[in-house]
Image (cartoon, grey):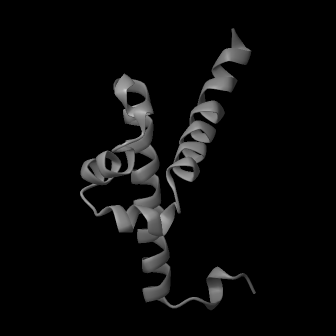
Amino acid sequence: MSANASLTARQRGARTQRLRTRERLIKAAIHLIITDQSWSSGINFLERVAAIVECSVPSVCAYFPNKNELLWAAYDRLLKHRLPVANKK
């Protein structure tokens, strides 16, 4: 039996919501990395990501304990999407 088979519909829904929120946070971080060169100062990075996603900084930290963890997730996503394109050229 798979791990998902033992979850109730409510638990699966909560898991799906957590994954969606995590995805939104990563996309917001990528947006800042690509469009706003001042993000690297780092002073308000988590606050700005939270504002884009319309949540609080503690909510962001529930998914990513610190700015570096969020940045690693964003860079990982960028590299996974960019490398296949670069290899085709």
Is residue 64 shown left or right of residue 57? Answer: right
Question: Residue 85's spot in the image, x, y percent?
Answer: 64, 20
Q: Quadrant of residue 77?
A: top right
Residue plotted at (69% across, 82% down): 3
Relative to 40, does residue 37 appear above or below in the rendering? above
Is residue 55 shown left or right of residue 30? Answer: left
Q: Nearer the viewer, residue 25 or 43?
A: 43
Is residue 76 shown left or right of residue 57? Answer: right
Relative to 20, does residue 36 appear above or below in the rendering? above
Q: Nearer the viewer, residue 53 or 7?
A: 53
Question: Residue 1's spot in the image, x, y percent?
Answer: 75, 87
Q: Residue furthest top?
A: 89
Residue plotted at (38% across, 23% down): 37
Residue plotted at (34% across, 61% down): 57
Q: Nearer the viewer, residue 24 or 84?
A: 24
Question: Residue 56's spot in the image, x, y percent?
Answer: 29, 64
Question: Residue 44's spot in the image, x, y percent?
Answer: 33, 44
